[in-house]
Amino acid sequence: MTEALQQLVLITLDEQGTIDDTRTLILPGQGQPATSNDDQITILGVLNSLLSREMITYETHEVLSHALTPEGVQIVDKGSHEARVWSVLPEKGKGTPVNPAELKQLVGDETAKVGQGRAFKNGWIGKEGAGLVKSITQIIDTTKNDMQEVASTGTLKAGEKVLADLRKRKLITQRKGQWFTVNKGPNFSTSAAKPETDLTVDMLASGAWKTSTFKKYNFDAEGVPTNGGALHPLLKVREEFRNIFLEMGFAEMPTSSFVESGFWCFDALFVPQQHPARDLQDTFYISDPQKSLPPEPEYYKRVSRVHEHGDFGSTGYRAPWSHEESSKLLLRTHTTASSAHILYKLAAKCRGETVEGDEQEYTHGAKSTTSLGAEGDDGFRPAKLFSIDRVFRNEAVDATHLAEFHQVEGVVADRGLTLADLIGFMRVFFKKMGIDKVRFKPAYNPYTEPSLEIFAFHPMLNKWVEVGNSGMFRPEMLEPMGFPKDVRVHGWGLSLERPTMIRYGINNIRTLVGHKNPIENIENSPAVMF
Ligand code: PHE
């Protein structure tokens, strides 16, 4: 229809030079002029498409047109009320007159009531005794004819007076309509070849662009809405943890080095070189390059001595020290490796080194806001630090384990800290996460003593679940770094994945991380609040 109509408009313009009134067009497939409002709407669509190609120009004219009410439609169908009354009556003297009660039964209450009056007025019917009969043998049903005319032309030749009467009788309603005057545009042609939308390499090469017609840009068109980025649930929960730490006055440690040496990941933490965690089955080792640069020699000596022979009041492991083991490069198995770097920097002044940039060196620039105390004569300044980043373990992947995950870690360094401080800190920390019920269980970590596993009561599972691990860092770790003897450092760590899975009700980690996680999950996952 659209193509044929388009062709009709162009050919008419070609033949007549102009279309004065689009209501005179006879639409393809229709035998009569396009006088109805719907027809004009169809024509408008085609005109706009031709206008965008500058093949035509057009002007809009407003008209008031009329449409039939449901009652009007019924009249087109069955005739006017008066005609229906007339049609059921016998001719005068040729049958039994119909009394009013019978008439109601024959044509219905409404038609009998309205039709009788008008039929009398028209002189169509008359009385015979108590009944009604036809007065004339033929009628012209003007109302029905008017309805038909309005239906097809939207108006009446008879004029406004009759229209007003029909409106009063609620047989027609007025509505606004449009029609158009059409003229040739600058790109007028009778072949409505689709205009090009893109200038292509081929068109440039062949020179076809010279003769092509191009579709005009529509700068008023609204663009396709773009999808905004979405944060992964893990990142949302990370933000929540970050806020908890920041509220508690912690500064964030830099944790960008995923690759560490055995020295920083284990030795500096007093993890024995023979510890099973250092096995190939548990830790990913780097094959190229395999060896790290040597750490600072004096510190390295102190660390190896405390392992091999004991020092600082400790008997050490008294096992052979392997330089090779210490220099192996690996993917860090915990963020405590990064904490060790930072703690070593924190103790720089205590070792008598001059430090420039101060705390900036060991945090992302954010200082511990609620500093636990001022710097002492020995160069020690208390610190509260945290990190949230990725770690790697050579584990078989299953519903709850991946070979990589995120650790949330908090570290507090101050003089004379006790286990009670650690427990107190963790209670506050977990409470801010919405976990009120926590319990602590003695545990073992090579680098902390005492060590505590943290359990939280899980109301949905109705049982105590392990949520983290913690402890007071050992003197064998802190003293080789150069911390004064009265400085205590405690720390705790937990995974980011577990609380995230609990928050979002996910029970398989592979639907949280990796290619099995549908992008919609990420886009639609709500922000969470602890
Ligand atoms: N690094 C420990 C872990 O991997 C967590 C921890 C951090 C424990 C700090 C004690 C102190 O689980």
Image (spheres, helix red, strand yellow):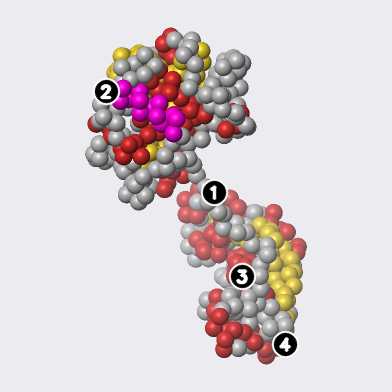
Principal SS element in the magenta part?
helix
Q: Is mark 2 on a helix, strand or loop?
A: loop
Of the numbered discs in the image, which one, if any, rests on residue 363? none
CB under 8 Å between callouts 3 and 1?
no
Q: Which of marks 3 and 2 is in front?
A: 2
Query: What's the magenta region?
Result: 297-309
Q: Is residue 154 above or below residue 461?
A: below
CB under 8 Å between callouts 3 and 4?
no
**Label 3 packing within 10 angstroms: few (<14), some (14-19), many (20+):** few
Q: Which of marks 2 and 1 is nearer the N terminus?
A: 1
**Label 4 within 8 A of ligand 1 by Cβ:** no
Q: Is residue 431 magenta?
A: no
The Cα atoms of the two marked residues, 3 and 2, are separated by 91 Å
Q: Residue tagged by mark 3?
A: 45
Indicate the amino acid at tag 4: Gly
Q: Earlier in the sequence, mark 1 or mark 4?
A: 4
Of the numbered discs in the image, which one, if any, rests on residue 228? 1
**Label 1 packing within 10 angstroms: few (<14), some (14-19), many (20+):** few
Q: Residue tagged by mark 2?
A: 318
**Label 2 within 8 A of ligand 1 by Cβ:** no
Q: Is residue 299 magenta?
A: yes
Q: Is residue 500 visible?
A: no
Q: Is mark 1 on a helix, strand or loop?
A: loop
Q: Which of marks 2 and 4 is in front?
A: 2
Q: Is residue 74 left or right of residue 10?
A: left
Q: Is residue 348 above or below residue 57?
A: above
Q: Which of marks 1 and 4 is in front?
A: 1
